Image (tube, rainbow, N blue to C red):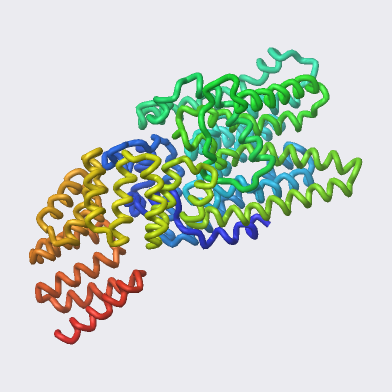
């Protein structure tokens, strides 16, 4: 059933961070990147090339290794990447079945929980979005670590402790959230302990078994610090948010996550969440009241609740605690459904327990309820896969939830621009510009849309406006160079491309544009050298092969020209460009 509901995700494109972390990440082309992953952060390939060096310094070497492996297997073939994500999610679902069978001793409870987990729509962000895989990857180690801990404590064999601790460490190398796993161990220990034992007694008996995990967590933190130079991080955009507002927003975020677990319908990448700044704000009062009610309810019925229910609650709460540190997030992304991947294990376990208890009194009602959940979750997951299928669908949903955000309109505009839907792109980027008139990245891409729509002079004026605000914006320099090239101002264009390459020598686009400029001014020897450098960075770039072929032809090297253009035609290309290549190839073959 899990494979069936995700079948429509296999045709999805690279979206959101995929375009940077996969399509735009040259480090993935080398197997050596796996070793480098342990000594650098996830976004290391971008460091030093961005004006605003914002991407968080995540230390997730196994995630980077996963990306590298997939690139070696599939290149930029999206279905292969989606298939691997689905394989990881399905494997995690199977592991969860065995975990919950061991915890509950009931195969049916485990099966219901695993089925619910496999279909839960909140997981679409972690499965259909390729770069959302760190949580499922972490689950592949998080879940076995808990299984082996339980086996160690019930069977007494040290090999299970060793395996559990190693799996715990590996899970942290996928993502930071599993560091909270020992809280689940404590809940399990308390659930199986004699009820009359005091809290202090239970803790004294539990803590010695947790020492190896504390040592592993310490080793991870030392390694993390040695690479990142810090343990934690505060997003630069959060510097403007008062600490009291961050803390007052936590109840709202926590309850939002609970709501998305219970009713995971019409989900989005962005929810237009803003910070709570007043104690009288309903977004503070209502969630706080809900959480207090839940805590009081659990306290009042603490003696009547079974150990399984307490373990389920711990599995929900423990993995959520790290993501309540809102300081690390961009203010538009403080609620992210992918963070529910691990907490949903506990939620699905809780659902299964309650359904089985209901079945003892009203079997038919329990069956109807279980069937309704499966159908609703499955249908919602299929629908949600369409949201993550392509950039337009993704950002249309984001604009629905956050119409006052310039970034949602901006990203939707870029999606339209990539599809050459210039009128739609202009409209969205104009709205982004209206909402944030001095944001240089908005102005830069608005200029691209203007240029694509034939507004050449306006495009140059707009991109110059962007550079007046931020002279170090490399993309704007590259775009200005391209616009100047189109109007025949080759010397000015060449200066712009050189400025980009001085700061970012790995820029394929700027080097390609420089090659075209050199070729246009008759400097074919330098142009050939430049296009060859482009192909070292991007060997499958059809346009670069074609332009190199043209430079060979202009230099009289007809055989080399034919070979390069034929090579260009072996790669996917825009239909119009392909016709141009074929016509040029035929022309050169006639003159040879």
- Is 27 located above or below residue 469 in the figure? below
Percent across and percent down for residue 117 are 67, 46
190 or 581, which is in the foreground?
A: 581
- Is 497 located above or below residue 270 in the figure? below
- The N terminus: image quadrant: bottom right
Which residue corresponds to the image point at 65% horizontal and 52% vertical from the top-left? 380
Residue extending furthest toward the bottom: 590
Percent across and percent down for residue 44 are 33, 40
From the viewer's perspective, is 68 left or right of 116?
A: left
265 or 452, which is in the foreground?
A: 452
From the viewer's perspective, is 429 left or right of 343?
A: left
Which residue corresponds to the image point at 42% horizontal and 57% vertical from the top-left? 424
- The C terminus: image quadrant: bottom left
239 or 11, which is in the foreground?
A: 239
Residue extending furthest toward the right: 361
Where residue 50 sits, quadrant-wise, is top left
The answer to whether any part of residue 39 appears in the image is no
Which residue corresponds to the image point at 26% horizontal and 75% vertical from the top-left? 581
62 or 589, which is in the foreground?
A: 589
From the viewer's perspective, is 316 left or right of 357?
A: left
Percent across and percent down for residue 272 are 52, 38
Which residue corresponds to the image point at 35% horizontal and 38% vertical from the top-left? 40
**Number of marks in the rendered image:** 0
The answer to whether any part of residue 250 appears in the image is yes
Percent across and percent down for residue 86 are 57, 54
Where residue 2 sits, quadrant-wise, is bottom right
């Amino acid at each position: 059933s899990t494979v069936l509901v995700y079948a429509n995700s296999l045709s999805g494109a690279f979206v959101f961070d995929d375009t940077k972390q996969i399509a735009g990440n040259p480090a993935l082309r080398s197997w050596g990147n796996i070793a480098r992953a342990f000594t650098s952060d996830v976004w290391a390939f971008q460091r030093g090339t961005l004006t605003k060096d914002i991407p968080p310094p995540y230390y997730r070497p196994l995630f980077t290794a996963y990306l590298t492996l997939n690139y070696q297997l599939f290149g930029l073939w999206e279905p292969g990447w989606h298939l691997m994500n689905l394989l990881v999610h399905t494997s995690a679902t199977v592991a969860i079945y065995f975990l919950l069978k061991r915890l509950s001793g009931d195969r049916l409870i485990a099966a219901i929980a695993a089925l619910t987990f496999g279909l839960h729509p909140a997981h679409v962000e972690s499965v259909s979005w390729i770069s959302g895989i760190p949580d499922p990857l972490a689950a592949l180690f998080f879940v076995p670590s808990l299984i082996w801990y339980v086996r160690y404590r019930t069977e007494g064999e040290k090999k299970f402790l060793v395996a559990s601790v190693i799996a715990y460490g590996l899970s942290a190398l996928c993502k930071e959230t599993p560091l909270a796993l020992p809280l689940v161990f404590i809940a399990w220990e308390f659930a199986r302990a004699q009820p009359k034992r005091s809290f202090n007694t239970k803790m004294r008996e539990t803590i010695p078994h947790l020492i190896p995990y504390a040592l592993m967590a310490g080793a991870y933190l030392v390694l993390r610090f040695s690479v990142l130079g810090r343990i934690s991080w505060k997003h630069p955009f959060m510097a403007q948010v008062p600490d009291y507002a961050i803390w007052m927003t936590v109840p709202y975020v926590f309850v939002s996550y609970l709501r998305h677990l219970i009713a995971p319908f019409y989900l989005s990448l962005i929810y237009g969440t803003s910070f709570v700044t007043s104690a009288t704000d309903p977004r503070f009062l209502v969630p706080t009241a809900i959480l207090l009610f839940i805590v009081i309810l659990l306290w009042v019925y603490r003696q009547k609740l079974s150990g399984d229910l307490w373990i389920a609650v711990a599995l929900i709460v423990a993995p959520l605690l790290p993501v309540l540190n809102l300081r690390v997030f961009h203010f538009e992304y403080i609620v992210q459904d992918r963070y529910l991947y691990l907490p949903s294990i506990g939620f699905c376990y809780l659902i299964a327990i309650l359904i089985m208890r209901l079945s003892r009194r009203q079997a038919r009602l329990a069956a109807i309820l279980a069937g309704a959940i499966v159908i609703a979750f499955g249908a919602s997951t299929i629908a949600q896969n369409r949201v993550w299928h392509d950039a337009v669908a993704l950002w249309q949903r984001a604009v629905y939830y956050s119409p006052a955000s310039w970034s949602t309109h901006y990203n939707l505009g870029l999606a339209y621009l990539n599809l050459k839907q210039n009128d739609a792109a202009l409209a969205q980027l104009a709205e982004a510009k209206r909402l944030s008139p001095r944001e240089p990245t908005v102005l830069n891409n608005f200029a691209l849309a203007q240029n694509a729509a034939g507004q050449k002079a306006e495009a140059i004026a707009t991109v110059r406006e962007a550079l007046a605000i931020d002279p170090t914006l490399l993309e704007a320099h590259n775009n200005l160079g391209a616009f100047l090239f189109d109007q025949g101002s080759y010397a000015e264009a060449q200066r712009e491309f050189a400025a980009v390459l001085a700061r970012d020598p790995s820029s394929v686009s700027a080097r390609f544009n420089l090659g075209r400029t050199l070729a246009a001014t008759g400097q074919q020897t330098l142009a050939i050298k430049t296009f060859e450098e482009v192909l070292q960075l991007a060997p499958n770039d059809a346009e670069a092969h074609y332009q190199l072929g043209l430079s060979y032809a202009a230099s009289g090297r007809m055989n080399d020209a034919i070979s390069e253009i034929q090579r260009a035609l072996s790669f996917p290309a825009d239909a119009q460009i392909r016709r141009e290549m074929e016509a040029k190839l035929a022309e050169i073959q006639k003159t040879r």
